[in-house]
């Protein structure tokens, strides 16, 4: 499933590819993870990204892999659309520390707006990139839909669409190819798949009680 096929997530049921790593001949990679979240709702997940703040809160999400968290351009009301989440994290409990700038987007800019509004759920969409270089590595989405048991999250990372974080700047194709080869490796993709499964598992465990404690709203 490529980024161009993202609107398939709006369809009911499941797709043939819901968890794992697929690498394409052009160097692009799709990473998928499926997390079932009993007792949670899509609205709680949306609240989480608006409430999530500094490092102490970020470590709740993954006590082993998460090291640092800060934000740029987030509104005082917690609206994360358009904000950049600045994080330091490892993946799979090993390897280097990745310093990332994750630029969140309004899901209506990513999906067919009418189709998205018809879904009983929410999508958390972003462009993941480097905190040390003004380069994005592609696109990502946590697509959350409500279920009889709570909700489920269908995560997608579409990596390989290398582009500048500077508005209006176009990177030369040779630069895009070099970054793609350097950054989107097999080990990185496999570790990211493991990390996504783990951190969303942690979130599923803590979210119902945390949401109730902070908001005083019953689940």
Image (spheres, helix red, strand yellow):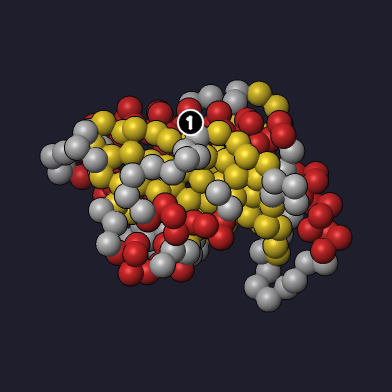
Percent position of residue 4, x then y: 56, 60
Q: Is residue 173 rendered to the left or right of residue 141?
A: right
Residue receiving disc 1: 197
Residue drawn 68% across the image and 76% down it: 168
Q: Is residue 136 visible?
A: yes
State whether residue 16 is above or below residue 190. below
Percent position of residue 120, x then y: 25, 53
Q: Residues within 10 Å of mark 1 (few under 14, many from 20)?
A: some
Residue drawn 40% across the image and 28% down it: 202
Badge 1 marks a residue whose secondary structure is helix
Residue drawn 83% across the image and 59% down it: 175
State whether residue 199 is above or below residue 129. above
The quadrant in which the C terminus is found is: top left
Residue 108 placement: quadrant: bottom left
Residue 87 placement: quadrant: top right
Q: Residue furthest right?
A: 174
- The residue closer to the viewer here, 181 or 202, is 181
Residue 174 placement: quadrant: bottom right
Percent position of residue 68, x then y: 56, 39
State whether residue 104 is above or below residue 217. below
Q: Is residue 53 visible?
A: no
Residue drawn 26% across the image and 49% down it: 43
- The residue closer to the viewer here, 51 or 172, is 172
Percent position of residue 65, x then y: 56, 29
């Amino acid at each position: 499933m490529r980024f161009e096929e993202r609107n398939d997530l709006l369809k009911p049921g499941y797709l043939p590819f819901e968890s794992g790593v697929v690498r394409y001949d052009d160097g692009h990679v799709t990473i998928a993870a499926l997390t079932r979240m009993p007792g949670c709702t899509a609205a709680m997940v949306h609240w989480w990204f608006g409430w999530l703040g500094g490092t102490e809160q970020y470590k709740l999400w993954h006590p082993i892999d998460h090291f640092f968290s800060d934000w740029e351009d987030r509104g005082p009301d917690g609206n994360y659309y358009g904000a950049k989440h600045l994080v330091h994290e490892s993946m799979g409990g090993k390897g280097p520390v990745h310093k990332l700038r994750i630029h969140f987007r309004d899901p209506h800019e990513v999906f067919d707006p009418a189709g998205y509004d018809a879904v009983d759920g929410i999508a958390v969409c972003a462009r993941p990139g480097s905190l040390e270089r003004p380069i994005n590595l592609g696109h990502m989405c946590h697509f959350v839909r409500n279920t009889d048991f709570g909700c489920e999250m269908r995560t997608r990372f579409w990596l390989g669409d290398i582009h500048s974080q500077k508005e209006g700047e176009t990177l030369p194709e040779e630069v895009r190819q070099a970054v793609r080869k350097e950054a989107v490796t097999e080990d990185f993709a496999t570790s990211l798949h493991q990390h996504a499964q783990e951190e969303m598992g942690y979130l599923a465990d803590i979210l119902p009680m945390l949401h109730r404690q902070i908001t005083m709203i019953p689940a």
